[in-house]
């Protein structure tokens, strides 16, 4: 096992404005909530922080505005030891913001992400980071930035023989060519269903593998995760915890899975460790502040 693997995370950065409520509201309904909280978030930046705390050396490739939220996001990543040379400033766009409701006993979330500098990231900006991509042990991406930028990262990763871990969130239809560039696809149940048209996670995973990705791990929330590779499908249970904040749990899982695979763990062992990490993350408030440290998720 290498001591510190090198990851590149290509993706979004947001400031999360989180409002706890007794339960999630129905359309047209007004509820009285708790106190509004502000945390660093964004699927890409969350995964970068989770991977850094898991022990990887991480570079973040993303975009932000020339404003206070963006400056705070960059400072936060830097403080985690993450390389931000390719976290570009797009002066004409605001930094990313996500409005999040967190409600009910299971602390489920509803998230709306504002249009922002995340949407300004171009394939050229990804190409500018090709030297760090080529040196990486794994590239991790999600779908909160424009698809052409994700495709470019996937293309560069494939060309340099670096495995791509794609968390297809938020879900959207993907071009057939992208699946063939993915080493490990990590959708949640909803995303797996939307991408494959299959309700059952095992069928969905098989259908997605037939499109060309080598392996699929479907996260099942409190039920754990289903893994699918050439050996077939297995479901591993989640660690039972009392949830405080589920925002970023999927990001935590994806990052720990990527670090585990980059360190040479097999898919099942990497999944077990990622499930332990994600369970810890849901017991803590805030996407990035809640990411666990390696010493807490031993070994
Ligand atoms: O996956 C959770 C993240 O989704 C939040 O941090 C929010 O910013 C949105 O990007």
Image (cartoon, rainbow, N blue to C red):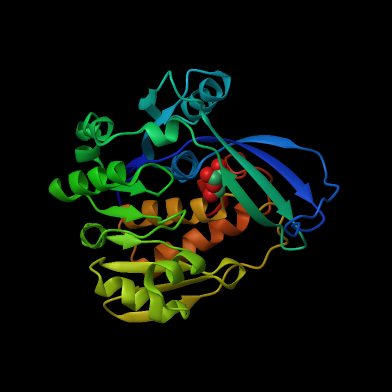
> Which residue is at a point 58% across and 73% down the rendered structure image?
223
Q: Is residue 60 above or below residue 296?
A: above
Q: Total number of numbered labels?
A: 0
Residue 218, picture quadrant: bottom left
Left or right of residue 284, residue 210 in this image: left
Q: Is residue 180 above or below residue 149?
A: below
Residues 123 and 134: in front is 123
Q: Residue 253's spot in the image, x, y percent?
A: 49, 56
Can you see residue 295? no
- Residue at 49% from the left image edge and 31% from the top image edge: 80
Residue 234 shown left or right of residue 183 in the figure: right
Q: Residue at x 23, y 68 (%)?
A: 212
Q: Residue furthest left?
A: 159
- Residue 282, compared with residue 153, is above or below; it is below
Q: Quadrant of ligand 1?
A: top right
Camera-nearest residue between 295 and 178? 178
Q: Can you name the residue that lies furthest to the front here?
A: 28
Q: Is residue 101 left or right of residue 194?
A: right
Residue 231 visible in the displayed image = yes
The percent coordinates of residue 164 (x first, y second) are 28, 53
Give the percent coordinates (x, y) of residue 276: 55, 60
From this view, report whether residue 68 is shown above or below residue 246.
above
Residue 1 in percent (x, y) is at: 30, 53
Viewer-side residue, 52 vs 180: 180
């Amino acid at each position: 096992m290498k001591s510190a693997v090198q990851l590149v995370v290509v993706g979004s950065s947001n400031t999360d404005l989180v409002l706890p409520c007794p339960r999630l509201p129905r359309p047209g309904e007004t509820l009285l909530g708790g106190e509004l909280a502000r945390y660093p978030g964004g699927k890409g930046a969350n995964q970068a922080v989770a991977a850094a705390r898991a022990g990887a050396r991480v570079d973040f490739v993303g975009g932000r505005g020339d404003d206070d939220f963006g400056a705070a996001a960059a400072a936060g990543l830097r403080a985690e030891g993450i390389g931000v040379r390719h976290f570009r400033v797009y002066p004409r766009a605001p930094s990313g913001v996500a409005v999040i409701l967190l409600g009910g006993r299971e602390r489920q979330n509803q998230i709306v992400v504002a249009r922002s500098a995340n949407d300004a990231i171009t394939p050229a900006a990804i190409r500018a980071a090709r030297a760090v991509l080529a040196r990486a042990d794994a590239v991790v991406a999600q779908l909160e930035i424009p698809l052409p930028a994700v495709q470019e990262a996937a293309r560069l990763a494939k060309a340099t023989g670096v495995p791509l871990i794609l968390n297809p969130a938020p879900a959207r239809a993907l071009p057939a060519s992208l699946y063939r560039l993915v080493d490990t696809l990590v959708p949640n149940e909803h995303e797996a269903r939307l991408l494959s048209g299959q309700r059952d996670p095992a069928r969905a995973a098989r259908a997605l593998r037939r499109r060309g990705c080598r392996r699929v791990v479907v996260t099942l929330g409190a039920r754990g995760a289903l893994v699918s590779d050439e050996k077939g499908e297995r479901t591993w249970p989640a660690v039972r915890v009392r949830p405080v904040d589920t925002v970023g749990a999927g990001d935590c899982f994806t990052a720990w899975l990527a670090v585990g695979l980059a360190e040479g763990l097999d898919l099942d062992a990497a999944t077990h460790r990622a499930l332990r990490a994600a369970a810890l993350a849901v017991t803590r408030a805030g996407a990035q502040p809640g990411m666990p440290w390696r010493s807490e998720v031993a070994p």
